Amino acid sequence: MSEIRAEILPTDVPNTTAARIIINAPASTIFDLLANPASHELFDGSETIQKSISGPERLFLGAKFAMGMKIKIPYRIKNTVVAFEENKKISWCHLMKWTWTYELVDLGNGSTQVTESFDASAIPGYAARWLKMTGAIAHNPKWMAKSLVRLKSICEA
């Protein structure tokens, strides 16, 4: 049996990354996991999410939620949901102004294509320095692919 992998997608815009996978589960099952901040640490391929600190059980447009994180040092980050289309798309950003987005496309037969993207193309200079210092842009494609594989495993179980 071959190893399950997500596809790392080419991007033409600096400070953006994306990955995609097909999950044999309905979009609603996948979206329910994405819309619950307490579940994010379960499929986080970067292993930087330590725990959900605050926020609603289920996200919605404009919802705020905070996560305990660790990249070299522990810190907390407060996110705001900036796009929300039930079972199709969810995006959030924080003070550094980059966004994480999950887009779901129902392929029929109970399968869903999930694309995760990271967009830091229009961030302030201090945020760009943070990305470079932490190596996040270099690591993000692999971390995102790993997250999608974990998401697939959870949703198909």
Image (cartoon, grey):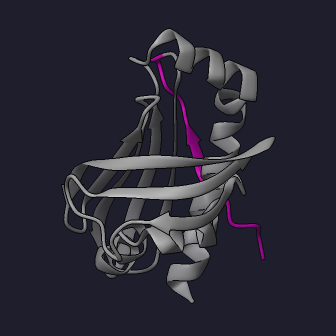
Q: Is residue 128 above or below residue 94?
A: above
Q: Is residue 3 magenta?
A: yes
x and y, in percent, of residue 116 in the image? 46, 49
Which of the 4 image quarters holds residue 26? Answer: bottom left
| Figure quadrant of the C terminus | bottom right
Q: Residue furthest bottom?
A: 157
Q: Is residue 126 left or right of residue 54?
A: right
Write the start and end of the magenta stretch as one range. Answer: 1-13
Q: Position of residue 151 (x, y in %)?
A: 55, 70
The reply, left or right, for residue 155 in relation to residue 61 is right
| 119 left or right, relative to 35 | right
Q: Quadrant of residue 49?
A: bottom right
Point 48% across, 37% down: residue? 118
What secondary structure predominates along the stretch shown in magenta? loop
View extreme (top): residue: 125
Residue at the image position 51 percent from the left and 16 percent from the top? 14
Residue 96: x %, y % from top left: 47, 29
Q: Nearer the viewer, residue 54 or 137?
A: 54
Residue at 32% x, 60% y: name it.
104
Q: Residue at x 61, y 73 (%)?
A: 42
Q: Quadrant of the N terminus?
A: bottom right
